[in-house]
Amino acid sequence: MMDKYICYRLAQIISRTLPRRFAYWLGLRIADHFYASDHAGRRAVMSNFRQILTVQGITASDKTLEQMARKNFQYFGKYLVDFFKFAQFTPTGIQRLVSLEHIEYLEQAEALGRGVIFITAHLGNWELGGAILASPRRRIHAVYLPHRENKINELFQKHRSQRGLQCIPLGHAARGVMEALKHKECVAMLADRDFTAHHFPILFFGKLAHLSSGPARIAVKTQAPLVPTFILRQPDDTFLLRLYPPIVPEPWTTVAELQERIRDVLEQEIGRNPLQWFMFDDFWNPGRNHEFSLTP
């Protein structure tokens, strides 16, 4: 298996030096290599898709699951190209490729004057969403999981900061998030995976899973509204940035109640776009997971 840092550096070089279409073509070839060589990752993706489809009343054949898994790897190849390529684009250039759906939901949340918690998932191009919404009047802090390799951290943090995002490492997130919301700023958090000790088992696509409870706990504590936000690749390789109505906590709202509402939105969007959900570990059977995982 190719070293992970080398994979990302290769993706960076391809993305920054080649036209987007040619970079995509090479990204797809590299993704096919990983699909063929990463047996554990391929099986994990197939297992995840089987669970999602089963809840939808679909019993998929192994052949169908294999085709879906390959497409998932390929979409991730395109995601990496865009992650590095878009660091070179101007805000105007990015906006030409992105359509907005229900931006008024964000305006409604901001009007409350409590700050905003964006919640999203490892879906589509989540890194791009914050860059699109960030502006001189809207400061966005993104919570991220530091990688064990410093070189990979530095590589990704450089590109995130170039997009105007303020980055908060997960291990020190609580203080940074609370401070941002205190100043009525925005925080972006991934809600589809729990990397903390605050495990909150909840039914997700019909089976118990550990989703992140951080957004719900912070919303209860600060009364900041949650705005589910997803940026999804379209067939022509443009993007749709979709916002959902704000989830506004009341003084009596519990973490469990908010967590269920977050879960419902995640199920709706991931269930509608499973091929763009980048989860290369066996989500519902973590004991089967392997050491090498593609997602940063």
Image (tube, rainbow, N blue to C red):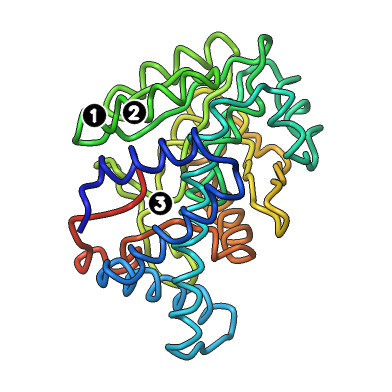
Residue plotted at (32% across, 74% down): 43
Viewer-proximal residue among 64 and 208? 64
Q: Secondary structure at mark 1?
A: helix
Which quadrant of the view contains residue 95? top right
Mark 2 Cα within 10 Å, few/some/many (few <14, many 20+)?
some
Q: Position of residue 122 (x, y in %)?
A: 47, 49
For disc 3, the marked residue is: 211
Mark 1 Cα within 10 Å, few/some/many (few <14, many 20+)?
few
**Which mark lies nearer to you, 3 or 1?**
1
For disc 1, the marked residue is: 151
Q: Position of residue 78 (x, y in %)?
A: 52, 51
Instruction: Say whether marks 1 and 2 touch (CB < 8 Å).
Output: yes
Q: Earlier in the sequence, mark 2 or mark 3?
A: 2
Q: Tag 2: residue type? A: Leu
Q: Tag 3: residue type? A: Leu
The answer to whether 120 is drawn above or below residue 272 in the figure is above
Residue plotted at (69% across, 46% down): 239
Q: Tag 1: residue type? A: Lys
For disc 2, the marked residue is: 155
Mark 3 Cα within 10 Å, few/some/many (few <14, many 20+)?
many
Viewer-proximal residue among 77 and 294? 77
Estimate the spatial distance between the alpha carbons at disc 1 and disc 2, rounded to whole Å.
6 Å
**Which mark lies nearer to you, 2 or 3?**
2
Q: Position of residue 19 (x, y in %)?
A: 59, 41
